[in-house]
Image: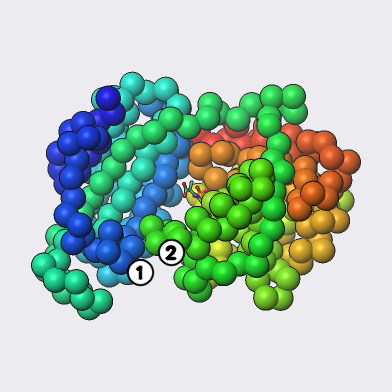
Amino acid sequence: MSIVFLNHAYLPAEEAKISPMDRGFLFGDSIYEVLPSYNGEIIGFNLHINRLNRNMSAIGIRLEWPHDEWMKVCKALLEKNGLGNLGIYLQVSRGTAPVRSHAYTKDIDPTVFAFSFEINPEQSASKSKVTPYKVATSLDLRWARCQIKSTALLGNVMHFQHGHQKGFNETLLYNDHNELTEGSTCNAYIVKNGVISTPSLDNHVLPGVTRHILLDLLRRNDSMQIEERVILMDEVFAADEVWVTSSSKEIIPVIEVDGKTIGNGEVGDVWLAAQKIYSIGKRGY
Ligand code: PDD
C-alpha cells in the first residue's frame, strides 16, 4: 500500500482526504512538480524546488518552506515506499475556502500533497535499449501561461489523448505560426546537420528541468552545438533526429511524426551522444 504525504501527515493513500471545496479541485488553482529518483537519489532536486517556489510566487501562494523541508518529505516518501525507480509528485494548492469564489483571500492555508510512483528505470545510453516514440501533432490550444507548472492540465490532457487514442506516444504542439512549442507532457528538440535546436523559453513552453540540465551539460561539451530559437514544423519533418525530454523519461528519440519517418527512421547518433552525456552528468544537479 502506498504511503502519501498530506498536510504534514504520512498516511496510506486510501486514507488521504481533502475537501471538495479545495481550490485545486474547484479551479485547478494549484501547481505541481515531478522529481525523478533512482535508488533514493533524486535528480535535479534544487532546480525542481526553485521552480516550485517560482510558480508559487507567480500565482501568489505563500508557503515558505526551506529546501530542507521539501527534502525531508521527499526522502520520507522514498523510504516509506521502497526506493527503486520512483517519481516524486509534489502539489501545492491554494487551499480550502468556505465559499466558491474566483477571488481568493491571503488567509487560506495551502494544501500540500505528495506521493511517489514508479517510473521507468534510468535510460540506458544504448540504441538497442531505448524504445523510440512515434508522435502526433496538434495546434497548441492551451493557455498563454504554459511556463507555470499548473495542475490545470485539461489542455495538455486533451492534446495527449488526441495522440494516445490513435496509438501515438506523444503529441507535439505548434502555434498559429506553425512554430513548435513543446509536447503535451515534455519539451521538444530537433537535430539537423549535427546542430541540436529547441524552442526558446517563453510563455508557451514549460522551462523543463531536464531541458535545463541537458542544455547545460551539452554546452559544457565542446563537440555539441546548441541553439534555442524558433523552430518551424517543416524543420521538424525535415530533421535528422527529433527528441523529447521530461523528468520521468530523460531523453527519448522520436522516429515518426504524424506517420512520417524522421531521418532514416532509426535512433540517431546525436541522441546517443547526448544521452551518454546526460546519463553521466545528471547526478551533478
Ligand atoms: N511533465 N512540458 C510539459 C508540458 C510537461 O508537462 C513537462 C513535464 C515538461 C518537462 O519538464 P521536466 O523536464 O521538468 O519534467 C515539459 C511532467 C513530468 C508531468 O506532467 O508528469
Residue 250, image x, y percentages = 58, 39
Three-letter code, disc 1: Ala
Q: Residue at x 18, y 50 (%)?
A: 18
Q: Which residue is depicted at the point 19% across and 71% down?
A: 100
Residue at which label 1 appears? 58
Q: Is residue 85 left or right of residue 58?
A: right
Alpha carbon separation for disc pair 1 and 2? 8 Å
Q: In the picture shown, does residue 235 fall above or below 68?
A: below
Residue reaching furthest to the front: 165
User: For mark 2, does the 10 Å Cα neighbourhood hold few (<14), some (14 to 19), or many (20 or more) residues?
Assistant: many
Q: Is residue 145 above or below residue 216?
A: below
**Ligand 1 is within 8 Å of the C-beta of the residue at disc 1:** no
Task: Provide the residue designation for mark 2.
Answer: 148
Q: Amino acid at mark 2?
A: Ile
Q: Kindly state the secondary structure of the residue where label 2 is placed.
A: loop
Q: Where residue 273 appears, x then y in whole percent?
A: 74, 36
Q: Residue at x 50, y 55 (%)?
A: 157
Q: Secondary structure at mark 1?
A: helix
Q: Is residue 14 visible?
A: yes
